[in-house]
Image (cartoon, rainbow, N blue to C red):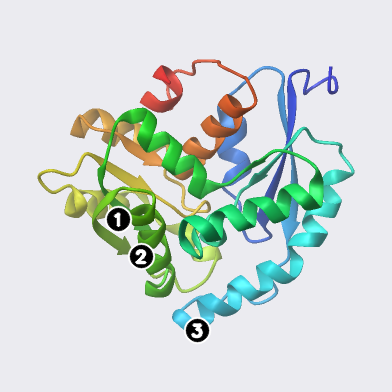
Amino acid sequence: MTNVVGTRAVFGVIVPSTNTVVEHDYWRAGLPGIAYRAGSMYIPNPVMGDDADFEALLGQIRASIDTAVRDVLTAEPDRMVMGMSAETFWGGVEGNAAFERRLRERTGLPVTTGASSCRAALRALGCRRIAVFSPYQPIADREVGRFFTEAGFDVAAITGLRCPTAMDIARVGDERLRQVVADLDAPGVEAIVQVGTNLSFVNLAVQLESELGKPVVAINTATLWHALREHGVDDRVEGLGALLREH
């Protein structure tokens, strides 16, 4: 027993200080015996209105991640989960692998990242040709596309919402997201993938998956799924899409 509320596992979850969505999405799964302890990466200037701003935002995250990890480790988690996705796509497949190595060395724990989780999810779902959307600026979308291409996927299109601040990501509503997905859903696209963990998309993804008849992968669902499966937790969860229900 890890502890009374996390009898099967406690996941340390590293999130930006501006993020209000990740923890909500994880707890919503209602998994008995799985608990989460979040560590916050301080972002004093959340502006991300252009490429330069976005790179500066990443700089703030890189400067504060060690403190966030330090804080989480005091709860003695069993696994570290990166609840911020852009950094895990940066540098393509090798950049993600290097990030995971650094975090494993820093913590001595197994690590789950959004990039690796999306790759594993798409392979489990049997999808190769994908379309992707994000809340990011073009500089970050290029890195996302690079990762998926290097991982062996055919990226038909990437749409960035270009949110002006990190907080604005959580303010994007379903109507806009529906339109983005509709624009991406071209013939031959086997799956729609959403990245950007502060974008509230888990519920809508389930609806769209049913309507479109193809996988719609929300990154928070994929990351939780991958953390669970890599940790030996095989629960099938209803109401969160095919990934957690069938794989």
Q: Kindly state the secondary structure of the residue where label 3 is placed.
A: helix
Residue at x 13% of width, y 49% of height: 186
Q: Earlier in the sequence, mark 3 or mark 1?
A: 3
Residue at x 80% of width, y 47% of height: 107
Q: In which quarter of the image is residue 133?
A: bottom left
Q: Which amino acid does label 3 sit on?
A: Ala
According to the picture, the residue beneath numbered tag 3 turns out to be: 52
Give the label, 3 or 2, closer to the camera. Answer: 3
Q: What residue type is labelled 2?
A: Leu
According to the picture, the residue beneath numbered tag 1 turns out to be: 176
Give the percent coordinates (x, y) of residue 27.
62, 31
Q: Kindly state the secondary structure of the residue where label 1 is placed.
A: helix
Give the percent coordinates (x, y) of residue 114.
52, 47
Cα separation, mark 2 vs mark 1, equals 9 Å
Nearer to us in this view, 114 or 200: 114
Q: In this view, does 166 lie above or below 39?
A: below
Query: 10 Å neighbourhood of mark 3: few (<14), some, or many (≥20)?
Result: few
Instruction: Tell me whether the residue at label 2 lies in contact with that at label 1, contact meaning CB atoms closer than 8 angstroms.
Output: yes
Disc on res. 161: 2
Give the percent coordinates (x, y) of residue 198.
53, 53
Residue at x 73% of width, y 29% of height: 35
Give the label, 3 or 1, closer to the camera. Answer: 3
Cα separation, mark 3 vs mark 2, equals 16 Å
